[in-house]
Image: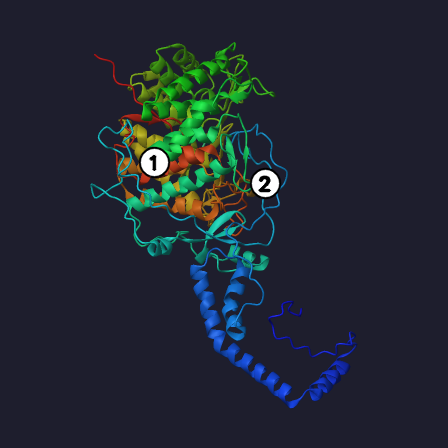
């Protein structure tokens, strides 16, 4: 025990001041006894009295301590465990001595974790969709024993409902948080009530866990093993719900999530492509402010006016495409061109159209190839284009999922060249040999214009949005372009014939892959766009069995979340075809990551719009809770994680993809909105990055 250093303590030194060596216990006992005997009777009485007093106080305060401990765990968020102990013990000590033993350290009002990070990841040349395992870059996992306890950022009950000017799209006052048909305002209650509503969040290695779920220490290795064999404690993986979570609450929860994500981006990555929320830094992909532009229309839709104004100011003052940088044609088109076009439509502000035109013209060199199939990369400053270094192939989904944007640019500018180049690609692909019942291979050569790597078919990475854009172009153009419809219908028949199967245990319907006539029961999370697309087709008059398949696939995508310990889907799952197997879903260790992808919530949005079945909203709500529980980073931002099967250590990857703000949160918001006219699916078609562009008015007959 260290002697107190301050004078304001009663100091009792029982040791011999001249003797510093205590060689054995016997000598020590004798020496103490001798000292005791040497004390006067008064001194001995005083010591005994003090000891008795201490004992009595100790006994009396025991229930108080435990009571306070419990109370603290309910109320105190800003202290780490040491601070907690200190705070608990302080009153007891004060009551004994009249004051505190030394100055207590001030509660730390911020994250304690100072993650030990690896070297910063440089510019990423690989996008999130470059195939399985892509983006498995440096895993930055914070280390260290600290488990700080932080308050959830206070729920800002700022109501936009009465203040917001209706955006252009909602001439009828579409954007409203209507409950029971009436505009609702969020009531500003007293502070105390607000505090009560705040959930207690504990940061666990960069992810946020609700305090009441995190009171148990992490299981030991043995306990973990035992758990793995036992049936899950919460087989439903249902996140405890608030008693009644109405539409307005859910909308506000999505806005809160957006504000939190935006705060991280604004504080640490402003004007850069992506936030790295754990290291509080940023990543650059093309240097075009990807997250900012991807977020513009989401902010507009959510009515986040201040945030939107700041972002617009950046677009006006800082955004330039006149820079010597190689960009990926597809990613830049769907995120930046799409984001600018949709923001132009929502706001009517010419700034966004001007920027879109500038970018569109700079992307055009990509189409100067022998085959007219565009190269994957363009230097928007130099006006040169090239394929990836290792091949002259382009990815099929990439060259066939830029059409909505280029076609719309032509319509707006009355300059036909944009539409012409992308329509040419569709025409070529339409008549190309190498398809199997409408299914297309994943690569196409920019010299020959032929498919390569034939015989492999997937609805996942590298082919996914080809199918999506067949339908959406047909809808965009007023359902007049028959070749697009033909290709789409044929492809869906091909999907049903070759790729749709059911699992053995629970008969879950899924879409697998075909490799040289061998079926592989593997499904990317990316495939979860399909139920939404099928439902959109059925809504537009396509066969009813498309909707049946959509319903079944949405259930499967929901199960891909529900059956995981974090309630979040992995990037890829393998389904069991054998009924003898106990589980429907297997996840390989390399596929356990979650990149905050949107496809399932996208489909939930379509399914709710077309069926009004509340279960889709509830599933979306659970997903939002899981994002908040396992991917929310204290201080701002959300992070992709490495392991959806490990709620104790989900393994933050230190990256917030721009599509989390551009798509995932937007679709969640639209899912919970009661306003069916807010981006009506009869007036708008969403590009593959969730940027809405208008369905063209039919030409006069
Ligand atoms: C987005 O960029 C787009 O949705 C794209 O079509 C697929 N990949 C991401 C989201 O997962």
Decide if residue 567 is in sight here. no
Looking at the image, is 340 positioned above or below residue 10?
above
Residue at 55% from the left image edge and 58% from the top image edge: 219
Give whichever of 260, 577 is nearer the camera.
260
**Residue drawn where x is 71% and y is 87% of the image:** 38
Q: Name the residue: 45% across, 66% down.
A: 70
N-term mark: 2 or 1: 2
Which type of secondary structure does the marked residue at label 1 adopt? helix
What residue does disc 2 label?
139
Please say whether residue 683 is visible from this viewpoint. Answer: yes
User: Would you call the spot at circle 1 few (<14 residues within 10 Å), some (14-19), or many (20 or more)?
Assistant: many
Classify the position of the C terminus by image quarter.
Answer: top left
On residue 288, which mark appears? none
Q: How many marks?
A: 2
- Give the answer, above or below, for where 699 lies relative to 54: above
In the current view of this chain or complex, which residue is farthest to the front?
7
In the image, residue 200 lies at what x, y percent? 43, 54
- Mark 2 near ligand 1 (CB under 8 Å)? no
Residue 367 position within the rendered picture, expressed as x and y whole percent measured from the top left: 48, 13
Mark 1 — residue? 302
Quarter containing ligand 1?
top left
413 lies above or below 658? above
Q: Quadrant of the N terminus?
A: bottom right
- Left/right placement of residue 244 relative to residue 260 reads left
């Amino acid at each position: 025990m260290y002697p107190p250093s301050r004078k304001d303590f009663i100091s009792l030194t029982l040791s011999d001041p001249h003797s510093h060596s205590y060689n054995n216990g016997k000598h020590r006992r004798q020496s103490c006894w001798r000292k005791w005997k040497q004390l006067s009777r008064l001194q001995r009485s005083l010591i005994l009295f003090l000891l008795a007093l201490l004992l009595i106080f100790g006994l009396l305060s025991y229930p108080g301590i435990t009571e306070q401990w419990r109370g603290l765990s309910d109320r105190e968020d800003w202290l780490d465990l040491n601070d907690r102990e200190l705070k608990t013990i302080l009153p007891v000590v004060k009551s004994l001595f009249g004051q505190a033993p030394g100055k207590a350290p001030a509660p730390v009002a911020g994250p304690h974790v100072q993650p030990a990070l690896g070297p910063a990841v440089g510019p990423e040349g690989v996008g999130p969709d470059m195939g399985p395992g892509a983006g498995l870059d440096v895993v930055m996992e914070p280390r260290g024993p600290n488990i700080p306890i932080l308050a959830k950022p206070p729920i800002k009950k700022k109501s936009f409902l009465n203040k917001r000017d209706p955006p252009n799209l909602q001439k009828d006052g579409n954007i409203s948080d209507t409950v029971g048909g009436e505009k609702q305002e969020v009531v500003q209650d007293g502070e105390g009530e607000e505090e009560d509503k705040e959930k207690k969040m504990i940061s666990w290695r960069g992810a946020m866990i609700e305090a009441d779920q995190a009171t148990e220490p992490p299981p030991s290795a043995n306990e973990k093993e035992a758990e793995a064999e036992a049936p899950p404690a919460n087989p439903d993986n249902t996140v405890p719900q608030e008693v009644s979570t109405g539409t307005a609450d859910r909308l506000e929860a999505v806005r809160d999530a957006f504000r939190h994500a935006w705060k991280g981006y604004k504080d640490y990555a402003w004007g850069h492509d992506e936030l790295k929320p754990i290291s509080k830094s940023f990543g650059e992909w093309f240097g075009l402010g990807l997250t900012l532009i991807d977020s513009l229309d989401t902010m507009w839709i959510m009515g986040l006016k201040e945030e939107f104004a700041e972002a617009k100011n950046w677009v006006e003052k800082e955004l330039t495409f006149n820079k010597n940088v190689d960009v990926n044609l597809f990613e830049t088109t769907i995120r930046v061109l799409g984001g600018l076009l949709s923001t132009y439509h929502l706001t009517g502000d010419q700034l966004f159209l001007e920027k879109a035109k500038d970018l569109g013209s700079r992307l055009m060199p990509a189409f100067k190839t022998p085959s007219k199939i565009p190269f994957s990369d363009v230097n928007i400053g130099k006006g040169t284009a090239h394929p990836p270094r290792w091949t002259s192939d382009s990815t099929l989904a990439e060259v066939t999922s830029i059409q909505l944007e280029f076609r719309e640019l032509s319509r707006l500018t009355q300059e036909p060249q944009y539409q012409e180049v992308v329509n040419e690609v569709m025409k070529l692909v339409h008549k190309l040999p190498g398809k199997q019942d409408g299914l297309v291979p994943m690569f196409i050569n920019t010299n020959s214009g032929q498919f390569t790597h034939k015989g492999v078919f997937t609805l996942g990475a590298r082919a996914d949005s080809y199918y999506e854009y067949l339908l959406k172009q047909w809808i965009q153009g007023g359902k007049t372009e028959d070749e697009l419809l033909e290709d789409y219908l044929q492809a869906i028949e091909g999907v049903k014939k070759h790729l749709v199967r059911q699992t053995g245990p629970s008969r879950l319907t899924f879409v697998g892959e075909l490799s040289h006539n061998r079926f592989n029961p593997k499904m990317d999370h990316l495939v979860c766009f399909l139920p939404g697309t099928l439902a959109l087709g059925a809504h537009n008059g396509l066969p009813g069995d498309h909707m049946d398949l959509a319903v079944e696939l949405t259930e499967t995508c929901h199960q891909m979340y529900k059956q995981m310990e974090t309630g979040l889907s992995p990037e890829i799952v393998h389904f069991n075809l054998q009924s003898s197997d106990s589980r429907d879903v297997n996840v390989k260790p390399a596929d356990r990551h979650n990149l905050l992808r949107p496809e399932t919530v996208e489909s939930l949005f379509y399914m709710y719009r077309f069926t009004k079945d509340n279960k889709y909203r509830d599933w979306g709500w659970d997903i939002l809770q899981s994002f908040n529980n396992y991917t929310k980073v204290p201080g701002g931002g959300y992070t992709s994680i490495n392991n959806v099967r490990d709620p104790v250590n989900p393994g933050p990857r230190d990256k917030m993809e721009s599509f989390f703000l551009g798509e995932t949160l937007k679709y969640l918001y639209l899912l919970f909105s009661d306003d069916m006219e807010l981006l009506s699916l009869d007036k708008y078609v969403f590009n593959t990055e969730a940027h809405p562009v208008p369905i063209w008015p039919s030409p006069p007959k």
